[in-house]
Image (spheres, helix red, strand yellow):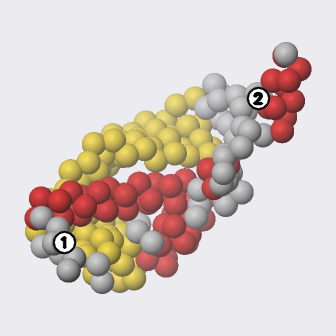
């Protein structure tokens, strides 16, 4: 006979599943991983980003492709997170700080806000059913300070990004440089 999970442990498991979904969202967005991004939403979910409102397929096309045509890099960082769980529905608030660097290198957009999400547990999985972005602040800045001609390994917007590598290894040029230093 299986051991029943206490309500307290189930609550912690639910909170972690919701937070994992929020983090998958940021990764799916920043790596332009359509499948990962889609895994965060129920098929009938609605996303309201203020200047864009729509369903899942259109959101992925917009968020991972259309609006990022003019950007060379971006990150979406989740900071504070809170979730109220009531049965198979949860309301979550996740703070986000985002940075978008234009391809021309002249402009960087920086902003912060909150994702207000209604999560629903369907078939045992917590996913977003409704998302509302609240934009709390934003500004534009000179992007010329970003130097990409350096020895850092740079991320990519696809599954060739080093974060997908298993097991993680050291890039050959780095190994060569370490060996040359002695």
Q: CA distance from mark 2 to mark 1?
A: 52 Å
Would residue 36 be found to the left or right of residue 159 on screen?
Answer: left
Residue 44 locus on image (x, y percent) = 35, 83
Sequence-earlier tag: 2 or 1: 1
Q: Residue furthest front?
A: 1
Label 1 environment density (alpha carbons within 10 Å; few <14, some 14–19, many ≥20): few
Q: Nearer the viewer, residue 131 or 12?
A: 12
Of 9 and 127, nearer the camera is: 9
Residue 122 vertical position relative to residue 175 in the rendered view, above or below = below
Mark 2 or 1: in front is 1
Please give the name of the residue rendered at 66% of the width and 51% of the height, measured from the top-left corner.
167
Q: Position of residue 73 (x, y in %)?
A: 62, 45
Q: Toward the viewer: 25 or 66?
A: 25
Q: Quadrant of residue 7?
A: bottom left
Residue 130 in sight? no
Is the C terminus in the top left, top right, bottom left or bottom right quadrant? top right
Q: Which residue is mark 1?
A: 3
Which residue corresponds to the image point at 55% horizontal and 53% vertical from the top-left? 30
The residue lying at 29 percent from left, 78 percent from top is 124
Q: Which mark is residue 111?
A: none
Identify the residue at horizontal 85%, vertical 24% (top origin). 179
Identify residue for label 2.
151
**Residue 4 can be seen in this image:** yes
Give the crowd class for mark 2: few <14, some 14-19, many >=20 residues within 10 Å: few
Residue reaching furthest to the top: 182
* Residue sitting nearer the eye, 81 or 115: 81
The quadrant the N terminus occupies is: bottom left
Q: Secondary structure at mark 1?
A: loop
Percent across and percent down for residue 95 are 30, 46
């Amino acid at each position: 006979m299986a051991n029943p999970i206490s309500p307290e442990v189930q609550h912690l498991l639910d909170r972690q599943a919701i937070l994992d979904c929020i983090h998958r969202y940021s990764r799916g967005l920043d790596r332009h991983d359509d499948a990962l991004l889609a895994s965060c939403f129920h098929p009938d979910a609605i996303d309201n980003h203020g200047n864009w409102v729509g369903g899942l397929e259109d959101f992925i096309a917009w968020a991972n492709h259309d609006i990022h045509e003019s950007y060379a890099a971006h990150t979406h960082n989740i900071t504070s997170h809170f979730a109220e769980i009531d049965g198979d529905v949860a309301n979550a608030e996740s703070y986000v700080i985002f940075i978008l660097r234009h391809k021309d290198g002249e402009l960087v957009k920086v902003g912060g806000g909150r994702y207000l999400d209604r999560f629903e547990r369907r078939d045992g999985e917590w996913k977003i059913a409704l998302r509302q972005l609240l934009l709390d602040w934003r500004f534009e800045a000179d992007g010329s300070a970003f130097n990409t001609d350096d020895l850092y390994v740079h991320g990519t917007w696809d599954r060739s990004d080093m974060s997908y590598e298993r097991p993680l290894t050291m890039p050959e040029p780095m190994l060569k440089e370490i060996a040359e230093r002695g």
